[in-house]
Image: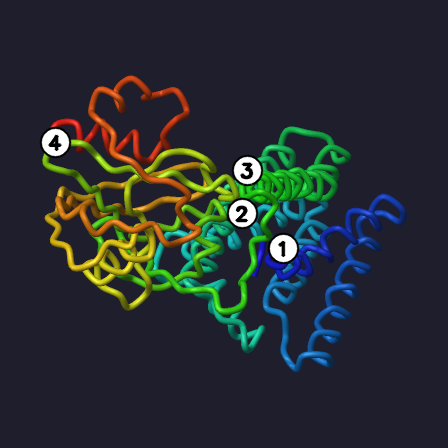
Amino acid sequence: MNRIDLLKKLLPGFIPLFVFIAADEIWGTRVGLIVAVLTGVAELLYTFIKERRFDKFVLLDTGLLVVLGGVSVAFDNEIFFKVKPAIIESILCIILAISAYTPLDIIGGMTRRYMKGVEMDEAVLSKFKQTLKSMFFIFTFHTLLIVYAAFYMSKEAWAFISGGLFYLVFAVYFLYEFWQIRKKKKQLGGMPIVKYEDEEWLPVIDDEGKVIGKVLRSECHSGSKILHPVVHLHVMNPRKLLYLQKRPETKLIQPGKWDTAVGGHIAFGEDVKTALQREAYEEIGLKDFSAKPIGNYLFESDIEREMVYSFVSYDYKSINLHSDEVTEGKFWSQKQIEQNLGKGVFTPNFELEYVNQLRDRLF
């Protein structure tokens, strides 16, 4: 479920309020209240006939319209009714906060109940949680603004803040989200962020490296920043020269730059050792080699977040470039590497690893 779908789920509950604001301007408070309540009842009946359920959010909004509208008319004081939108949004804020910041996902549960067949993997769940957090702050801001308008601003200003401003805020928010998606696609060279046929699954891990789920490979590179593990193998010869590979110009990420000898994702269900052996053979034809760990670290770019497990091997003689994934490979001295740092020759990932790990531990 994306942000637009989530908003569509929540908006019906606000329709009676928006109807009242419009009707109040035309016919006055009493008639506006009646029209708004009838609109809420019509919504409830429509939902029940179509989906065999009562929309609890619409029911809550309509009920508050009746109670607080009735109190406002009885005491001839509009303040009771004016704070009604803030009350219902406060309830929504509480639900959003619980769903976004605690394991009790109320809105997610409602989504799965009303949209049967919808499943959320770790990537979708992460985005869903982020959506809830964003909407929590937006609704909280709007709620406080409604309360302020109810007590200190004119009726016209309150009507705009309770109604029109609601749409404007979300219009700006969704335009920003649309721009973010376009930006991510541009970073990926226009590659659509969708599931490809036979696309591999990668493990989702926490900061301690524990596997907590799985995610599609393309989603990891979509800007979602879902933490996933990768392996790096650095190959050296007895002269302390470091072997690097050159990335093909056709690569979407860092094309034509020199990079770690071996680097690749750990597949879901695969252990680190198996992934290291597989990637070493696939990229530089290296097999039957021994390797020792250097350490692990978190790497984050504009489009991904990785836990990198680094190893070094001195078994270099069986290197055999046999894949289109690598166009060239050669040994570099420490002096050559130092002279080319920060000049766009190497990938940012390699430079970070060289400065923080390799410089002191291998040379």
In the picture of the structure, the residue carrying the numbered disc 3 is 141
Estimate the spatial distance between the alpha carbons at disc 4 and disc 3, rounded to whole Å: 63 Å
Estimate the spatial distance between the alpha carbons at disc 3 and disc 1, rounded to whole Å: 16 Å
In the picture of the structure, the residue carrying the numbered disc 1 is 7
User: Counting residues from the N terminus, which is met first, the one under dot 4 or under dot 3?
Assistant: 3
Q: 294 above or below 88?
A: above
Q: The residue tagged with tag 1: helix, strand or loop?
A: helix
Quadrant in which the C terminus is drawn:
top left
Contact flag, marks 2 and 1 (Cβ < 8 Å): yes
> Observer-nearest residue: 130 or 207?
207
Tell me which amino acid carries mark 3: Phe
In the picture of the structure, the residue carrying the numbered disc 2 is 135
Q: How is the image coloured?
A: rainbow
Q: The residue tagged with tag 3: helix, strand or loop?
A: helix
Contact flag, marks 4 and 3 (Cβ < 8 Å): no
Residue 75, numbered circle: none
Tell me which amino acid carries mark 1: Leu
| Neighbour tally class for label 3: few under 14, some 14-19, many 20 plus, Cα within 10 Å | few
| Neighbour tally class for label 1: few under 14, some 14-19, many 20 plus, Cα within 10 Å | few
* Residue at position x 39%, y 50% in the image: 226
